[in-house]
């Protein structure tokens, strides 16, 4: 689960990057420099980036080089912007994240971690590294896919209880977070499912915002290009009224 490849010349952990975005506007507060890391163990039926699943793929970077690239755009960040690390699943490259966020903190860069929480575990050495990472993370954007355990496994191929455990632990640590939920008709949009999520969020002390992300089909061509059957074929995006209803429940 940990990426431990090092650059022989400089002793830094290498991170495997799928892509970079210089002016992200939907990945945290303000204008963000967004780093999409490669690798994910979840197989969400609605995933719009299946090309990020493969571990060890993409372009290898040193943390210092990425910070240098991001720093060139600092004049656009204002008071709220900074860097966001997304994926894939960034927690699969924990050692690299620790180096990256440590360097960002030295420069006073606001850091956002966009994660599904899937790798979270209280086992060592992951847990101690994760707690260290939280001390260097200004905001966590946590995707909660489904509140029902069986529904979560059907939708993502992975369990969900450890993700909820991570949310509770962040709340106890005082870690600011945004909760994100993808609204998929017939999968995650029932009133019961939404109310269960609202009730869970209500138990967390540090949630600053809840975002409803309407399901879309813009990434279907990637599944086709990869030769993978798209599991939600025929499912249409939710209506604006249904999205508004979900936001009303979760606000």
Image (cartoon, rainbow, N blue to C red):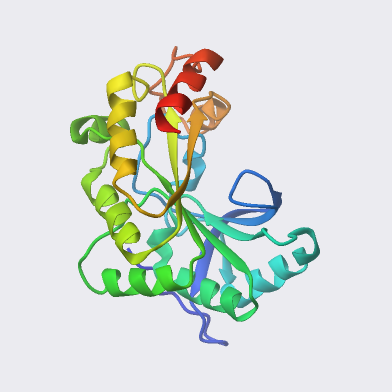
Residue at left offset 40%, top offset 20%:
232
Front residue of this view, candidates 75 and 15: 75
x, y percentage for residue 163?
29, 49
Give the number of marks. Answer: 0
22 or 241, nearer to the observer = 241
Image coordinates of residue 46 in percent, x first then y, are 43, 29
Residue located at (45% from left, 58% from top): 176
Quarter holding the C terminus is top left
What is the quadrant of the N terminus in the image? bottom left
In this rendering, the answer to whether 88 lies above or below 219 is below
- Horizontal placement of 45 versus 103: left or right? left
Residue 146 seen in render: no
Residue 100 visible in the current orientation: yes
Q: Position of residue 121 (x, y in %)?
A: 24, 61
| 46 is higher (above) or lower (below) than 80 | above
What residue occupies the far right of the structure in this picture? 75
Q: Which of the pair 175/157 is nearer the observer? A: 175
Query: Which quarter of the figure has residue 60?
Result: bottom right
Horizontal and vertical percent for residue 35? 59, 57
Quadrant for residue 157, please give it.
top left
Task: Say which residue appears at 56% left-offset and 64% top-offset.
Answer: 111
The residue depicted at 38 percent of the width and 63 percent of the height is 174
Image quadrant where residue 95 sits? bottom left
């Amino acid at each position: 689960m940990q990426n431990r490849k090092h650059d022989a010349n400089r002793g830094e952990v290498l991170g495997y990057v799928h892509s970079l975005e210089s002016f992200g506007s939907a990945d945290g507060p303000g204008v963000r420099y967004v780093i999409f890391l490669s690798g994910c163990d979840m197989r969400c039926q609605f995933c719009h980036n299946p090309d990020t699943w493969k571990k060890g793929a993409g372009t290898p970077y040193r943390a210092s080089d990425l910070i240098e690239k991001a720093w060139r755009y600092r004049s656009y960040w204002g008071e709220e912007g900074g860097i966001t690390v997304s994926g894939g699943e960034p927690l699969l490259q924990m050692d690299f994240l620790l180096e990256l966020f440590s360097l960002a903190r030295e420069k006073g860069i606001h850091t956002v971690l966009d994660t599904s929480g899937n790798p979270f575990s209280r086992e060592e050495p992951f847990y101690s590294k994760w707690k260290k990472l939280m001390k260097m993370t200004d905001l966590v954007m946590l995707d909660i896919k489904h509140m029902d355990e069986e529904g979560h496994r059907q939708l993502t191929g992975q369990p969900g209880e450890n993700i909820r455990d991570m949310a509770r632990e962040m709340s106890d640590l005082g870690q600011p977070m945004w909760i994100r939920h993808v609204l998929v008709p017939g999968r995650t949009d029932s009133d019961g499912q939404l109310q269960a999520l609202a009730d869970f969020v209500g138990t967390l002390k540090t949630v600053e915002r809840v975002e409803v992300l309407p399901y879309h089909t813009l990434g279907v061509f990637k599944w086709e290009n990869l030769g993978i059957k798209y599991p939600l074929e025929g499912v249409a995006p939710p209506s604006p009224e249904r999205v508004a209803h979900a936001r009303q429940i979760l606000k």
